[in-house]
Amino acid sequence: MIGYFFKKTWQNIRHSFWHNIICLVATTLSLSIFGFFLLLIFNLSIFLKTWQGNIPIIVFFKNEKAALEAKSQLEKRKELKKVEYVSSEQALKRLEKWLKGKFSLLEGLKENPLFPSLEITFSPFYQTPSFLENFKKNIKNFPGVKEVACPSYIFSLLVTTWRIFKILIFLASIFLSISTIFIISTLIRFNFQQRREEIEIMRLLGANEWFIKCPFYLEGLIQGFFASVISLFILRIGVSWYNLKIAMFQNGFNFSFFDLQRILGFIGCGFILGGFGSFLSLYKS
Amino acid sequence: MIRFINVYKAYHSTYYVLIDLNFHIKPGDFVFLIGPSGAGKTTLLKLIYREEKPTQGEILVSGFNVKVLPNKKLYLLRRKIGVIFQDFKLISYLNVFENIALMLRILNYPSHFIEQKVSELAQRLDLEEKLDSQVETLSIGEKQRVAIARALIHHPPLLLADEPTSNLDLLRSEKVIELLKEANKEGATVIFATHNESLTESFSQARIMHLEKGILKE
């Protein structure tokens, strides 16, 4: 029976070949845009996670003694991943390295103007803008603290932007999903109408609805499957092209492609959209 | 098997095609439904397999109350009926084999069984050389034989034949009648609608029902 359904589906596709091709192009386009947005979210979350894990708060102290005392106290706290002491000399060396050719800027200095500091990074669970802000307030009360440099504002801004971006992409995804379902359901409805006479004959002979509609459901699923696979292929080529031609030469951010789990999820999504599209078009036929 | 109780059928609310039909056909009966064109023979058959609903009255077929049978369950009734349609109702883009096999596919028979049954029946109806041909390329007589094969292939308990020999020569007409008689011998109830009264001579035991202007006379 399954073999018969596949044969029938293939006949349906062949019968309205160009309609199927046009539908496949439109669905692929829609899914490619959808996939592109998902890829943006995916890469942005990777970027945020990487960046988040390395945000240090830098606490400058008036003298070495105060810095080392604070270090011994802070090291006991589990929410901190690393507390690194940077002496005034080490800080100066870093500055020299950073300035490279512009070393002359430091030549006039009679003594080291830099303060000793502690570079504190947090365990991933505590890397939230509110925790950073509280920690900043708290550490200011430590003895000998001169200044606290904390990127919590930038971090907070980035997190908010990411959240807004996620909502926008979510809304766009809904719109694109609906359009994919609409395209597929239109195709299936069209093919079903074209076969109206044959379907009536089948009904007269005693075919049940499942027997009649199954090839059309399969057609929708196949459309969704191929559209998602082709979209992934297009996106993969796009990512490779971007990494090779743009990111490499212009020092940009390297895009990552979906992992296997997400690839399978995306194909599953294509399947579901295709199946749902055909289900909608045949629901009351 | 079939019971019509005060059945009326009207098109456009005033034009009555069938008027007050009351009859009972028992399982295993062979019935000739005789009447000129336009007498209402096809409509009567349509009422039995519920392509049409009666305007008034009750129709019972194989335990189903046809008038109130929900659309979702219609297939249960229709699977018990083999219909030889006057206009054949073949699927034009399928070949002869697939058209005949369709009924068995609907009933989910395995492929090897379908192949065996189709070739057996095709041989009996002189269609074995046409099995791979597209239906569109067949002559009217050949199409009629394909339609007959499709109706007989699943050995339905009820056979409705709407002018099944109208496009056949004498020899082939006799063959078709033989096939229907055989099905009847095996227990099938047969209703043979025709305008050709002389065909009734071929089967003396058959019951004859005359339909004229929608009124039944036995």
Image: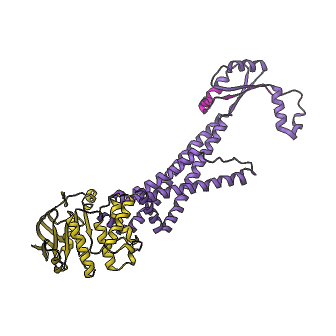
Report the residue at 26% width, 59% height from top: B74
Q: For residue A115: magenta?
A: yes
Using the rendered image of the protein, determine whether residue A160 is visible from the camera's viewpoint: yes
Q: Colour of chain A?
A: purple
Find the residue positioned furthest to the bottom: B169
Find the residue positioned furthest to the left: B218
Using the image, determine if residue A181 lies above or below residue B11: above
Image mark count: 0
Q: Residue B136: horizontal and vertical position, in percent?
A: 39, 76
Residue A59 location, quadrant: top right
Residue B84 location, quadrant: bottom left
Colour mapping: by chain
Q: Residue A101: horizontal and vertical position, in percent?
A: 87, 41
Q: Residue A285: horizontal and vertical position, in percent?
A: 35, 61
Q: Colour of chain B?
A: yellow
Q: For residue A117: magenta?
A: yes
Q: Is residue A175 left or right of residue A142?
A: left
Using the image, determine if residue A267 lies above or below residue B31: above
Residue A106 location, quadrant: top right
Q: Is residue A93 left or right of residue A142?
A: right
Using the image, determine if residue B211 lies above or below residue B63: below
Q: Residue B213: horizontal and vertical position, in percent?
A: 13, 77
- Nearer the observer, B130 or B71: B130
- Nearer the observer, B31 or A86: B31
- Nearer the observer, B123 or A65: B123
Using the rendered image of the protein, determine whether residue B16 is visible from the camera's viewpoint: no
Per the rendered image, the range of residues in magenta is A109-136
Q: Is residue B109 left or right of residue A43?
A: left
**Quadrant (top left, top right, bottom left, bottom right) of the N terminus of chain B:** bottom left
